[in-house]
Image (spheres, helix red, strand yellow):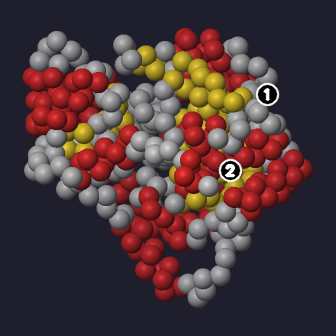
Amino acid sequence: MFESLPLLAADPILGLSIAYANDANLNKVDLGVGVYKNDAGITPIMKAVAEAEKLRIARETSKAYTPPAGYPGANEAVTKLVYGADHPAVNAKRVRTIQTPGGCGALRVAAELIQRAKPGASLWVSIPTWANHVPLLGSAGLKLREYPYYDYNTHSIDFAAMLATLNEIPRGDLVLLHACCHNPSGADLSRAQWDQVADVLEARGVIPFIDMAYQGFGEGLEQDTYGLRLMAARLPEVVIATSFSKNFGLYRERAGSLSLVFADEQQANAGNSQLLSVTRALYSMPPAHGAALIDIILHSDELTKVWSDELTLMRERIAGLRVQLVQSLNGLQQGRDFSFIAQERGMFSFLGLSVEQVHKLKSEYSIYMTDTSRISVAGLSKEKMDYVAKAIVSVL
């Protein structure tokens, strides 16, 4: 049976990580992998998570399956984290939230539910978008189409082109939007732009599918949900996939959630039954540990503050690294202005380098990034900032 299967090339980003690990250069820098790292190059366990794990171990009395939707307490806490304390859609009992195996699980479960409701539905994704959006969503049977978003020449959102395309999308289609910290560009919609997008989607009957993988990494836990909460308040149907890999540091625990806003409570009950039917066919029950930690943290005022404070420090560190990189690059040359990096949010930015320049950075300086010159800003450190900046300038 399997002899007909050809060998596939390694995933580009995972391949970079392997090459980086095998590189003997002591000055090597990994700007490819999209995980948070501290100045020591370590992805730490957050303090609130470590404390919650102690409580989890002390309290756990069974390894029996969790309910199909996951811990009710965690779902309640996550709904409040995503929508806020008094959102009209939540108060109207139009929202249903379940736990999923990471943000990827949330995306795939949503795609399967959409495919069940409307086979072959069209989902519009930004140019560019996170590379894994395509296989996760497309292989479920959805038809992926594209709308313009990032202008590589100006290093900014081409909002006029984006809005023009949104105004042509047929009623009943879906549009994938990044809630904050756009991956891979780092260029986020302003509040005024979110308002305009909401106007268009509401007028045309287009359903927003919002991916929120970086809540708290942009401007703040509340600020990063502006567009999402706006859509949920104004539109009858919204799909929201959430990851806790980044803001809780639970990468390997695969903790995520899928939340849907329905037109009314009756449709919410029907939709939730279908949602649990989808998950039953995919993985039966969700993983427990990560969701249990979130449940503990968000139901403790003390641990919530510890977590929020540490997340603030992580966000501010990344913002500071952006400013330092701009200062270093602009201080070494005047031919190109890199100020756009400091204006972007979250983990990623495009440097605007050619494939040849990217390969030269890898071969001559052991600095690793994707061929598109997308970097993970969190992979930088104060210690190696000058080394990275001088290397980049040398290949311009």
Residue 69's spot in the image, x, y percent?
A: 71, 64
From the top left corner, tell me how far across and down residue 45 is, in percent.
35, 65
* Label 1 residue SS: loop
Position of residue 339 in the picture relative to residue 98 (left or right): left
Q: Is residue 165 left or right of residue 39?
A: right
Q: Does residue 153 appear left or right of residue 177 in this picture?
A: left
Please give the residue where the numbered disc 1 appears in the rendered image.
172
Instruction: Give the residue drawn at x 56%, y 47%.
Output: 4
Q: Position of residue 213 (x, y in %)?
A: 50, 46
Along the viewing direction, whichever of 166 and 301 lies nearer the viewer: 166
Q: Position of residue 333 (x, y in %)?
A: 11, 18
Query: Label 2: few (<14), some or many (≥20) within 10 Å?
Result: many
In space, the residues marked 1 and 2 are separated at their CA atoms by: 19 Å
The residue labelled by disc 2 is 109
Which tag, 1 or 2, sits closer to the chain's start?
2
| Number of numbered labels in the structure image | 2
Q: Amino acid at mark 2?
A: Val
Q: Which image quarter is the N terminus in?
A: bottom right
- When the figure is inspected, residue 6 is found, relative to residue 302, above or below; the finding is above
The reply to whether callout 1 and callout 2 are in contact (CB within 8 Å) is no
Q: Residues within 10 Å of mark 1 (few under 14, many from 20)?
A: some
Q: Of the residues tagged 1 and 2, which is closer to the observer?
A: 2
Q: Which residue is drawn at the image coordinates 74% and 62% (left, top)?
A: 280
Q: Circle 2 — which element? A: helix
Q: Is residue 321 above or below residue 194?
A: below
Residue 143 appears anywhere in the view? yes
**Of the residues shown, which amino acid type is indicated by label 1?**
Gly
